[in-house]
Amino acid sequence: MRVGSSQAVSSISTADSSSVSVRGMDLADQLMGHVGFSTFYFILVTGRPPNGAEQTLLDAALIAIAEHGITPSVAAARMTFAAAPEALQGAVAAGILGCGSKVLGTASDAAQLLQAGVVAVDGDAARLPDQARSEVARLRSERKLLPGFGHPLHREGDPRARRLFALAEELGTAGLHCAYAKALERAAGEIFGRRMVLNVSCAIPAVLLDVGFPAPAMRGIPILARTAGLLAHLVEEIDRPAGFAMAGAAADSVVYVPGD
């Protein structure tokens, strides 16, 4: 089909009275009952099915970031649902809207950091340590955050990150992005003079970039995964309400100080 230069186009999906097509495949006949949801997501984003290694790493990445206890996003979602139980979608949105530079949203920034470093060394793994030291030093001098590093709980190492890197090694897919992530961790420890733990938000883009997952879609990994976790908390909120208790605890923890 020919389209004009000003015509908006999409290659993802179309539908008619008898069928739905997704990336050129019939949804009912070729996808439903034939692939899992993560495979379907990979097809949606990339336009092709994942190979075995890509499938395993995508599943592992989604599982790794889906749930982490009573996080700020969970508290926001549960308190919203307690106040408006008729608006499940609003409660989910409340949790996802906090996906940013401090919590949950750094996978995208880490992906950009890793990509830039790998491009800078032009495929020469021997140059990665120097590139890592240079980049960490630059970020420190500019008083900028090192995305995907540090964790308030996993101070001795993020078990999710360790597992993702181990999987990449087992699958034989660990490449320059994984190597650069580890080089950044070593460089950060040297330059900051203390351990800077590489967390799951750096490990996810490292292992996925090495198998060709598109960097622009990286922020969607924690959003998609955490949506599943939030929905589980909201289902639990129905039978085991905690939203108002969280709100009360927040009020009790803040001291009122009269303003000027």
Image (tube, helix red, strand yellow):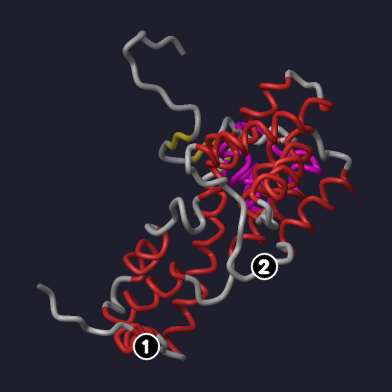
Left or right of 2 on screen, residue 27: right
> Residue 44 lies in magenta, yes or no?
yes
Q: Secondary structure at mark 2?
A: loop
Q: Residue at x 53, y 41 (%)?
A: 109
State yes or no: discs 1 and 2 in contact (Cβ < 8 Å). Answer: no
Q: Residues within 10 Å of mark 1 (few under 14, many from 20)?
A: few
Left or right of 204 on screen, residue 106: left
Q: Residue at x 67, y 44 (%)?
A: 191
Residue 34: give x, y in percent of width and height.
70, 49
Residue 93: give x, y in percent of width and height.
36, 61
- Looking at the rendered structure, the kind of residue marked 2 is His
User: Splitting the image into 4 quarters, where does residue 42 fall?
Assistant: top right
Mark carried by residue 249: 1
Q: Which residues are magenta?
A: 27-55
> Residue 29 lies in magenta, yes or no?
yes
- Looking at the rendered structure, the kind of residue marked 1 is Ala
Mark carried by residue 154: 2
Q: Residue furthest left?
A: 260
C-alpha separation, residue under disc 1 versus residue under disc 2: 24 Å
Q: Quadrant of the C terminus?
A: bottom left
Q: Secondary structure at mark 1?
A: helix
Residue 135, relative to residue 58: is it above or below? Answer: above
